[in-house]
Structure formats: structure tokens, C-alpha cells
Image: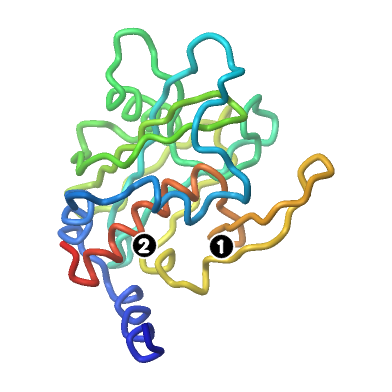
Amino acid sequence: MNDSAANTLNRQDQERLTIDEVCRALALANFDGQAAQMKMAPQFRAMLRPPTRTGPPRQGSVLLLLYYHQDELCLLLTRRRDDLNHHAGQISFPGGQQEEGETFLQTALREAREEVGIRPSTLTILGQLTPIYIIPSDFYVYPFVAWRADKQRPAFYPSLTEVAELLEAPLAHLLDPANRQEEPWNFRGFEMSVPFYLVNGHKVWGATAMMLSELLERLRAVRQGGG
């Protein structure tokens, strides 16, 4: 791709997004979701559950919540409290472990209600992204995409026991290549390259960034005429 074409696509990325584009992006046929997720995977990250793990993995869901705010299509992220047992202090989507008798969608909606106070009856489910395995917590996670169909910004009531901060990120901001960065990080004495998105001064990395990458790559495919 030449510089002129790349600049055109970058301008498209930053133009106002519509919910119709999101729906078309989620409905793309033959889209390789795992390849899109790998664009934001930390170096050397495995995608499959190690054969040395015993017993069944845990299963859960997350909700990628879209809504209009100040005439922009935004995505909700949360910063987890620093004293939690898993992924403390990290940026994530509302979500958690599946409870007995729940579907994965019901799990995502319940967790969104518990974590940020969103009533499921106010949401329209748009579709799913590719499930992803999270190595440190031994979780298979099923991501769902929903939006507030009345075009109103939801009234959020974050859980004081789980959520330290709410981050509202315009999708156009996330699509801007300048907000995707990469740097070497040290994990227990081992250095690896970690890509991340910059959102309100925070670094969104790991499984959250990988799921987000799939949504963004689907949107780019639609804007480039792929659906």
C-alpha cells in the first residue's frame, strides 16, 4: 500500500463511526478473528491452553458496550481495583465467570449490571467476537458486543468492590494508529515486546487489547470495502 492510500484509510478510521458499520463488521463472513486478535498479542503469547493444565478451565464472558456520547460512538472499559485476586489494576471489559445455568450471554449481561450498573433491558445485542483463552487465570472468555439503542449515554453505577475507574473511549480514537504503541516489558526477569492502546493515559494490553483488536480490524475491513 502506498502512502496516499494509507493516509486515506487513516482519515477514514478517524471519521465518525456508525452503528451500521459495527453491525456489518460483526457479520463479516470468513473473517479470521484469531489473526486479528494476534495483532495485539504480547510477544510469545500462546493462544491454546497448555496441555500441562489439569481439570477443566474456567469459562466466562465479557461485554463490549457501545453507546453515543457527545455525538461519538464510544466503548466502555473499566480499570480493575488494585486489590483483586486476578488481573488487578488492569484495564478490562465488564465480565466474569459463568454461573450455573447461565448462557454465556447471560453471564456477560449479569456482570455488566453488577460491575457498572447497566440494565440488560436497555441494551441491544449486536453479535459476538472470537472466544479467547487467558493463560494466567485459566479462563476461556466469550466476548459479546452490545449497544444502548436509544443513543443515550448510560448512567453508570460502578461497583466499589471491583471497579476503580471507568474509561470511555471513542472508537475513532481507538482506530487512530497513533494510539497503538509497543514497548519492551519485563516479566519476572524475562523481556518481551508488548503492544497496547493508549486510552485516557492508561495502557490497554493483553486479552482486552486482543479482543478490541478484533473489533477494530473488522471495522477496518468494512471501511476498506470488505463488507
Looking at the image, tell me whether mark 1 or mark 2 is earlier in sequence order: 2
At x 32% / y 79%, what residue is drawn? 9
Q: Nearer the viewer, residue 164 or 4?
A: 4
Q: Does residue 70 sit above or below 137 in this rendering?
A: below
For the residue pair 155 and 127, the one nearer the viewer reads as 127
Q: Name the quarter where the C terminus is drawn.
A: bottom left
Is 146 rendered above or below residue 75?
A: above
The x and y percentages for residue 65 are: 33, 45
Q: Position of residue 21 (x, y in %)?
A: 19, 61
Which residue is the site of mark 2? 171
Q: Of residues 212 and 83, which is closer to you in this image?
A: 212
Q: Secondary structure at mark 1?
A: strand
Q: Secondary structure at mark 2?
A: helix
In the image, is residue 95 above or below residue 184? above
Which residue bears the numbered disc 1? 198
Q: Residues within 10 Å of mark 2 (few under 14, many from 20)?
A: many
Under mark 2, the amino acid is: Leu
Real-space Cα separation, disc 1 to disc 2, in angstroms? 12 Å
